[in-house]
């Protein structure tokens, strides 16, 4: 009996070490519970944070994943290589979006939701949606403002689509690249937990941008303090998700590096939100939001097409 | 081909076969997944072998293609589950529609403002790169539709939105105002819904059922962006 137990735990430790060495395979999620000597008996007996049955399930998951990854390695020039990044169902994508909207301290987004199967569908289409929603709602704000105050000149502002697209995609792909590179560089300092793969970092950032979409739509409401409130809420949710995901990885680093990294991540995220607000929703001349100005501005609108207020602008 | 001739086949009948008979044994085996419709309908094969299309008048050639395009337009306007768009795909229709839309949407060149509507090239790029991206997305998700079939369907389903653009331009000739805007908004919304229904009728079946929403959402985004460009069009 005792020898069988020893064998089982020994196998688990081997699998752990193997997985920690190969950067692309599933890494252990229980590193904070285990000591390198593998006194797993204590950890399992006390239940950890996931429970005994989850541990068994994760071990078999890891073994299965290891096997899978060793079997099929299509080259990056084949179509099926890229197909493996889109191997998600609708329910899985929705689940990941929900996980990014409600970050919880115990649940690491990468381990709990991605489960080592990052996808490119979410990041790509969330960025596309966010870029177009930014441009459209920015333009809508101008329309609504012009209905209130006819001296404002309305134009479709199509160049904002280009600006939005480039800035969102650059943020969602270059910042994870920099973060991943930095984490790999600091890999030597960490003993137990390997860094996330590049795709997992991109996934985390992509799904964390999802909360900005309803925030941008809510920015249509032309009340300034409400806009800043929504912005702060969304930024808080999104940055919290990022921090909770990155914390297990940087925790083992020196305190200084960990603090600097996390604050840089949050700062960049805040810069994105504030930049979007200031560029796409330029603060227009303040006017009272009450309905009467709308009614009185309508008759003056009718004889003029919307693009000819240039003659009215000096007035 | 030499191997086919010398292939073992049936030893009993090998001696009584005429020359090159083994060629008829070459066929595409059933377990190679082939996308799209590759069988040539009998009618056009006979036509090819006749080579009469070389001798026909230019008018006949053009009318044949125009009739094919027109038939597909009808299939888009009255979407039923039919295979015509998929089986005989062509890209003439999407090209005509895209050029028409881009010509109508572009802002005047020189003295228009800097931040006006899209240029011709911008509309063109959005339509074609959008269609290519959606097609790639659909194939990466595991759909069994071929690249050009999907481009064909997406391009043809822009037809309702092009009609909406025409109507909007006509409506904009009248007095501007909130009624004007409401009419345009209503027309664009109806045509947007029509486009989505038409393209979904053709595209949805090619996806596995648990990923259908993932494949249809980009189509929704694509037509939404085009509708937005149509709605915000203001004549200079």
Image (cartoon, rainbow, N blue to C red):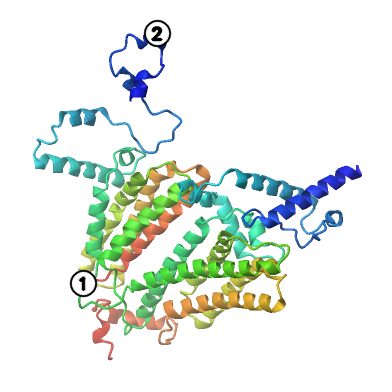
| Residue that numbered label 2 is attached to | B12
Q: Is residue A200 left or right of residue A5?
A: left
Figure disc tally: 2
Eyeballing the image, is A181 above or below A82? below
Percent x, y of residue B236? 22, 74
The nearer-to-camera label among 2 and 1 is: 2
Percent x, y of residue B118? 29, 68
User: Are circles 2 and 1 on residues that touch, CB within 8 Å?
Assistant: no
Q: Residue furthest bottom?
A: A315
Q: Residue furthest right?
A: A2
Q: Is residue A113 left or right of residue A74?
A: right
The N terminus of chain B is located in which quarter? top left
Q: Residue B40: name its quadrant.
A: top left
| Residue that numbered label 1 is attached to | B108
**Residue located 78% across and 52% down the image:** A13
**Residue located 31% across and 61% down the image:** B125
Q: Are marks 2 and 1 on the same chain?
A: yes
Percent x, y of residue B126? 33, 61
Chain letter for the residue marked with disc 2 in the picture: B
Chain letter for the residue marked with disc 1 in the picture: B
Percent x, y of residue A166? 42, 69
Q: Is residue A286 left or right of residue A43?
A: left
Tell me the crowding category of disc 2: few under 14, some 14 to 19, or many 20 or more residues within 10 angstroms, Cα based: few
Q: Secondary structure at mark 1?
A: loop
Q: Could you tell me if residue B167 is visible in this image?
A: no
Give how far apart the Cα atoms at labels 2 and 1 are: 77 Å
Tell me the crowding category of disc 1: few under 14, some 14 to 19, or many 20 or more residues within 10 angstroms, Cα based: some
Q: Could you tell me if residue A152 is visible in this image?
A: yes
In the image, A287 versus A154, the foreground residue is A154
**Residue located 64% across and 61% down the image:** A109
Of mark 2 and mark 1, the one earlier in the sequence is: 2
């Amino acid at each position: 009996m005792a020898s069988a137990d020893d064998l089982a735990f020994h196998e688990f430790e081997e699998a752990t070490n193997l997985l920690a060495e190969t950067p692309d395979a599933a890494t252990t999620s229980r590193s904070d519970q285990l000591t390198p000597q593998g006194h797993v008996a204590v950890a399992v007996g006390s239940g950890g944070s996931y429970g005994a049955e989850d541990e068994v399930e994760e071990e078999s998951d890891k073994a299965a994943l290891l096997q899978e990854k060793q079997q099929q390695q299509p080259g990056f020039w084949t179509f099926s290589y890229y197909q493996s990044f889109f191997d998600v169902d609708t329910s899985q994508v929705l689940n990941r979006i929900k996980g990014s909207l409600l970050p919880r301290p115990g649940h690491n987004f990468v381990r709990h939701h991605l489960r080592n199967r990052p996808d490119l569908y979410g990041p790509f289409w969330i960025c596309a949606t966010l870029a177009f929603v930014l441009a459209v709602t920015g333009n809508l704000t101008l329309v609504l403002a012009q209905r209130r105050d006819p001296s404002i000149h309305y134009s479709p502002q199509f160049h904002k689509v280009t600006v939005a697209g480039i800035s969102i995609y650059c943020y969602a792909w270059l910042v994870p690249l920099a973060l991943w590179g930095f984490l790999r560089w600091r890999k030597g300092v960490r003993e137990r937990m390997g860094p996330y793969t590049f795709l997992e970092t991109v996934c985390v950032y992509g799904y964390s941008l999802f909360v900005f979409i309803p925030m941008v739509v809510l920015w249509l409401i032309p009340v300034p303090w409400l806009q800043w409130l929504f912005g702060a809420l969304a930024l808080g949710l999104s940055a919290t998700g990022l921090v909770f995901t990155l914390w297990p990885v940087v925790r083992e680093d020196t305190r200084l590096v960990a603090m600097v990294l996390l604050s840089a991540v949050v700062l960049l995220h805040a810069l994105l939100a504030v930049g979007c607000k200031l560029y796409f929703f330029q603060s227009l001349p303040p006017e009272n939001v009450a309905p009467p100005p709308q009614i009185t501005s309508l008759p003056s609108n009718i004889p003029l097409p919307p693009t000819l207020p240039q003659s009215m602008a000096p007035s | 081909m030499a191997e086919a001739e010398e292939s073992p086949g049936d030893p009993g009948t090998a001696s009584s076969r005429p020359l090159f008979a083994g060629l008829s044994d070459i066929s595409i085996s059933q377990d190679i997944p082939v996308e799209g419709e590759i069988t040539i309908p009998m009618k056009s094969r006979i036509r090819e072998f006749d080579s009469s299309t070389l001798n026909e008048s230019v008018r006949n050639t053009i009318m044949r293609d125009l009739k094919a395009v027109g038939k597909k337009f009808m299939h888009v306007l009255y979407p039923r589950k039919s295979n015509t768009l998929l089986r005989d795909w062509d890209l003439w229709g999407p090209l005509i529609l895209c050029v028409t839309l881009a010509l109508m949407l572009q802002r005047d060149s020189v003295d228009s403002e800097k931040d006006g509507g899209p240029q011709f090239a911008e509309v063109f790029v959005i339509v074609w790169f959008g269609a290519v991206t959606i097609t790639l997305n659909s194939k990466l998700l595991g759909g069994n539709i071929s690249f050009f079939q999907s481009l064909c369907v997406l391009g043809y389903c822009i037809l309702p939105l092009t009609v909406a653009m025409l109507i909007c331009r006509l409506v904009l000739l009248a007095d501007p105002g909130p009624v004007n805007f409401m009419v345009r908004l209503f027309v664009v919304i109806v045509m947007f819904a029509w486009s989505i229904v038409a393209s979904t009728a053709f595209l949805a079946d090619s996806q596995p059922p648990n990923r259908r929403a993932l494949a249809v959402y980009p189509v929704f985004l694509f037509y939404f962006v085009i509708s937005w460009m149509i709605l915000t069009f203001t004549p200079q």
